[in-house]
Amino acid sequence: METQRPNGSPESSRPSFTTTRSVQLAERTETPAGMLAGFPTWPHLVVSPKTTSPAGRSIEKRRIRKHQLLNVIREHGPLSRADIAKISGYNLPSVSSLVDELVSDGIVVEEEARPTSRGRRPIPVLLNHKAAVVIGIDLGTKTTIGVLMNLGGDVLVRIERPTPSFRTPDGKADDVVKFAMDLLSQCPQPLAPLAGVGVGISGLIGTRRSEQENSVIFEEQFQSLLAERLGVPALVKNDSQMLSLGSLWFGSGAGYETFAILNIAEGLGLGFVINRRVYRGAMGFAGDIGHTPMGDSGIPCYCGNTGCTENVASGNGLLRLAKQEGLEGIEQHELEEMFHAGDERARRIFRRFTEVLGRAVATVVHLYNPEVVILAGRCAPDSSIYFDQLKHEAALHMRPSLAHSTEFFPCKLREDAVPRGSAASVLHHIFSSAHVDLEQVL
């Protein structure tokens, strides 16, 4: 995790920054190894330890502590070093040393010293939102949406375009890199260093190989492929799991410990957060609720089974129901307009959609007992069409105690929830050590 400076002394791998009271960030002098040559990068800002040597573990322990303090500053700043020590539980000399490194890095800035009646005047520090940028991409089957975001979660650039047809993982990786370059090139100058790229992909994203699943994208393999091309860390997960992170960091789930979020996209997915951690399952396949058998019986699904839930309760399901009603070729927004105009066919379609989705929601509540169920996804209909009816349908299949104790509400982020969640996956690796196996480091 270290590089050698030109004079031979070891230094943590990071951009060479010039730090003043206002903290001006100098451009990185070295060229990224990947295809993003010409754009500044900060690949080691992301905490992802892989060392097993005693010396390496010592370095990683210090780096993790530094990033834990960074998260305290992010959540509570501006704070004095003494206040940071109280919140973090670390001793003051250790905190002062680590915070000095963060200031030197340019990732936090010092404010003017505060007046005090006695003793040294405390110098508050706060997160420098402009120190780095991250990218989040929602690689949908029909549409790709990407955002470029600073460390404070502000969206600097947003791009949406049709998703090309991919024949190989290499082709998909090359398109992600091109999309990332487009986002960076449209950012107002000066451009801060890129720390990492998160990508949410629909379908099965496996954490370990299964010989029975030829259509699975394997997380580690695709992440390595992207990181090699990008020159910065790449994080790849199922789009519903990225959606969960987006809600946890920026959306309706921020105030909850445990929640479920339905991803109503072209298909139907589920993200689940337990104790503020995204639950992924043994192989990363948790939340594939679209292929539970609660849909119309006998209707074949591309997965090879019949009667799958998403053949009714999804964007594609709505279009299939519309085709049955003689509305072939119609777009979802047109179907919603017909509903509001009182068209009986549109009302039948959304009634059936809501009935099946209500059963799926009731199943989730009985299995996991979340505090809240959030309805999200780029194909989620206008909430005025289905939301109240959905709560009614779900309650019909739930125990009364669960129906009364579970909250429901629509996601405010709508189609930007997955790309922002993908960006949040990178922020999570910068500010949180929850993803790190601390036993290996300690």
Image (cartoon, rainbow, N blue to C red):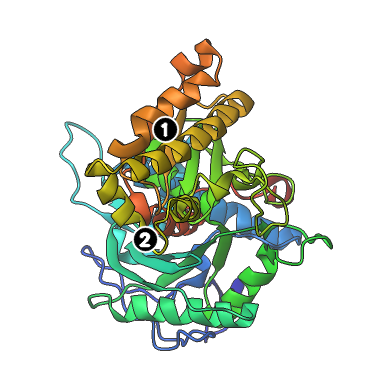
Residue for badge 2: 330
Mark 2 or mark 1, which has the lower sequence index?
A: 1
- 388 horizontally vs 284: left or right: left
Classify residue 347 by image quadrant.
Answer: top left
Q: Which secondary structure, mark 1?
A: helix
- 430 horizontally vs 171: left or right: left
Q: Which secondary structure, mark 2?
A: loop
Q: Which mark is residue 163?
A: none
Q: Where residue 425 appears, x then y in whole percent?
A: 49, 55
Query: Residue furthest toward the right?
Result: 211
Above/below status of 49 relative to 257: below
Above/below status of 275 relative to 6: above
Q: Residue at point 26% right, 54% down?
A: 110
Q: Which mark is residue 86?
A: 1
- 145 horizontally vs 398: left or right: left
**Quick one: 56 or 168, which is closer to the camera?**
168
Spatial separation of the CA atoms under disc 2 and disc 1: 60 Å
| Amino acid type shown at disc 1 | Lys
**Quick one: 222 or 55, which is closer to the camera?**
222
Q: Residue at point 33% right, 72% down?
A: 192
Q: Where residue 329 appears, x then y in whole percent?
A: 40, 64
